[in-house]
Amino acid sequence: MERKRVAFESLGCKLNYAETVQIEKEFISRGYEVVDSSSSADVFVINTCTVTQSADSDCRQIVRRALRSSPDAYVIVTGCYAQGKPDEVAQIDGVDLVLGAKEKFHLFDFVNGFSKANGNGDGAQTDYHGRIFVGPVEDVVEFGAADSAIDGSRLQVQSPDSPETIHLDKRSGVPGRTRAFLKVQDGCDYSCSYCTIPRVRGKSRSPSIDFLVNQARQIAASGFKEIVLSGVNVGDFGSKDGRSLLELLKALEQVDGVARYRISSVEPNLLTKEIVKFVASSPRFCKHFHVPMQNGADEVLKRMRRRYNSNQYRDIVSYIREVIPDAGIGADVIVGFPGETNEVFEKGMNFIESLPITYLHVFSYSEREGTASAGMSGEIDPRVKRKRSELLRMLSTKKRFEFNRRYVGKIAKVLVEEEVKNGKMYGFTSNYIRVEMEANPMHVNEISDVLITGASDNTALGQVIL
């Protein structure tokens, strides 16, 4: 009997990707073959983001693309967009099932098959009130089975309240991949004026250090060389019960068999000098920090309700560069926030240009319903946003190229990924330089010594030293 095929799309942050991996493993355990999202499949699962308007529209485009290649595919949409606007998602033509933050981890409890021809596949767009399962985030439980006593005859949408638990899987990572994602935290207690994440993810919560150490051991036993620590606000780990991110890092370093840990992102007000010094001295933690900035002008940071100013941001990234001269340092930047005049933008861009960072993730501000920034005065023309985004992306390209070029002629340790394109394989250094090399299967999932022979805008060129 031919195995059924399932494809996945994960939008947004590394935490979403980590959670998609958990869902993927559930399908694998039930005999499904995982295929690329561009391939024909019986089931498509889309784990959405809702940070920007484009993330919402991306979901619609993915659904249309999936149905072009697989007209009879059963389409499931979950994640933050689904949690925040289930009615809107359900009315997208072709969507069969909408699952919220809790429900996505118990997908098989909500459907008795994945066929548009059966009772569970009539199409959410025509009769969607029985096809939406979005419950309160506080009901997310550790390893618990989903409540299957759900009234499928009515719309089930409730507002997230005060979650105190976190859904985690007993295993992380999917066989055949080189990096595993370990979810160490979920939710957020911050009140940034532009952000919907606290509403769709709930309050900050963390599992125990012992639990995460045990997960890391299992990941190591599965053969993964790198573990990425992911979460909505990783730096807030343990804040509810007197623990700290530094305590977690020290405990994880003691796990045998893990070659590398990479911290996905830490807010600048939570990235302490002690954490930086620990990473500097650790043989296992990657010399790479992603430190969200959002804007380089204090006027905008204040309107955004960020918990730091530009001087504090400069202090922490400068300290990283001082203590770890080779560190890769990334930042998120939002352009076009209400009130960001041309003068304010130029001030912020000059600030960013002066920083010792290596790359930027640039986003255009988009108004999100229900946020404090919605309706703020000083709206920016979309054409201006696009121009500013391009200027910052050009700056990012320049910084990344200059950083990559520093390593030409040097030997770096590169974890070679499974991905191969046009006879080339790729991998990342500890400080997050993407390296392109001639493909050789014997090096996949190995940390190899690589001579950096050249640099381009986005990658370095390398040759494995045999």
Image (tube, rainbow, N blue to C red):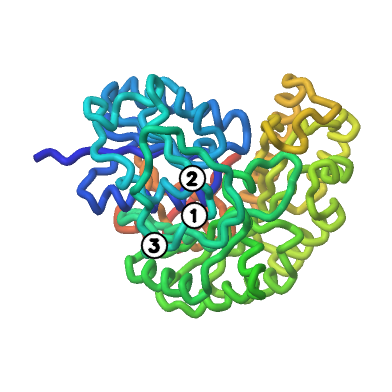
Looking at the rendering, which quadrant does residue 41 occupy?
A: top left
Q: Amino acid at mark 2?
A: Gly
Q: Report which residue position mark 1 lands on.
A: 139
Of tags 2 and 3, the one toward the viewer is 2
* Mark number, residue 223: none
Residue at coordinates 73% horizontally, 21% vertically from top-left?
382
Q: CA distance from mark 3 to mark 1?
A: 12 Å
Q: Residue furthest left?
A: 1
Check contact, mark 2 vs mark 3: CB within 8 A. no
Figure quadrant of the C terminus: bottom left
* Front one among 402 and 339: 339
Residue at coordinates 49% horizontally, 67% vertically from top-left?
260
Element marked by disc 2: loop
Looking at the rendering, which quadrant does residue 186 occupy?
A: bottom right
Tell me: residue 76, above or below residue 167: above
Check contact, mark 1 vs mark 2: CB within 8 A. yes
Q: Local crowd at mark 1 within 10 Å, few (<14), some, or many (≥20)?
A: many
Q: Report which residue position mark 3 lands on.
A: 143
Residue at coordinates 37% horizontally, 65% vertically from top-left?
170
